[in-house]
């Protein structure tokens, strides 16, 4: 359980931070400059790597991984069978939404950890009531 304020970081926040042409880049550049404790999942890291690999090239994809490694207040949570099972329940609950497994695991973990802020541009991640930082900016 988290004991101090933390923000959950979704793939879209990492993308906006690293892609200067993204609409939300100024916001995430400011947030990542002085971040609170941050958490994400191994699925988000994999999803981000894949996005940069497909959109750009392996150099940018490796640059993404290097940024993740250097982001000191970031904790990468592993995803095991119990998180996937809980995420599957959420995907069934919100079956009218196009949730990815990474999104559903994030929703589950934010609930378990009582996370108060989600760094994302993906509106699906507000389904359980946790505010997106883009709505508060």
Image: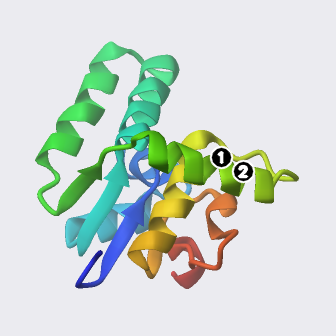
Q: In this view, does 78 lie above or below 96?
A: above
Residue 131 in percent (x, y) is at 57, 79
- At numbered mark 1, what does the secondary structure look like: helix, strand or loop? helix
> Is 20 displayed left or right of 136 in the figure?
left
Q: Mark 2 points at which residue?
A: 91
Residue 21 in view here: no
Quadrant housing residue 68: top left
Q: Mark 1 points at which residue?
A: 88
Of residue 9 and residue 2, the one placed in the foreground of this image is 2
The alpha-carbon separation of the residues under discs 1 and 2 comes to 5 Å
Q: Quadrant of residue 46?
A: top left
1 and 2 marks in contact (CB < 8 Å): yes
Which secondary structure, mark 2?
A: helix
The vertical placement of 118 against 65, above or below, is below
Between residue 44 and residue 86, name the one nearer to us: 86
Which residue corresponds to the image point at 57% horizontal and 77% vertical from the top-left? 130
């Amino acid at each position: 359980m988290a004991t101090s304020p933390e923000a959950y970081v979704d793939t879209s926040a990492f993308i906006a931070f690293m892609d200067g042409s993204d609409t939300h880049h100024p916001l995430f550049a400011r947030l990542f400059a002085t971040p609170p404790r941050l958490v994400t999942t191994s699925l988000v890291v994999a999803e981000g790597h894949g996005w940069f690999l497909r959109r750009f090239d392996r150099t940018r994809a490796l640059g993404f991984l290097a940024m993740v490694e250097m982001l000191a207040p970031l904790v990468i949570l592993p995803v095991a069978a119990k998180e996937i099972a809980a995420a599957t329940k959420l995907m069934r609950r919100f079956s009218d939404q196009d949730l990815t497994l990474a999104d559903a695991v994030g929703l589950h973990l934010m609930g378990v950890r009582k996370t108060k802020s989600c760094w994302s541009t993906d509106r699906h991640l507000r389904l359980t009531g946790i505010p997106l930082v883009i709505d508060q900016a």
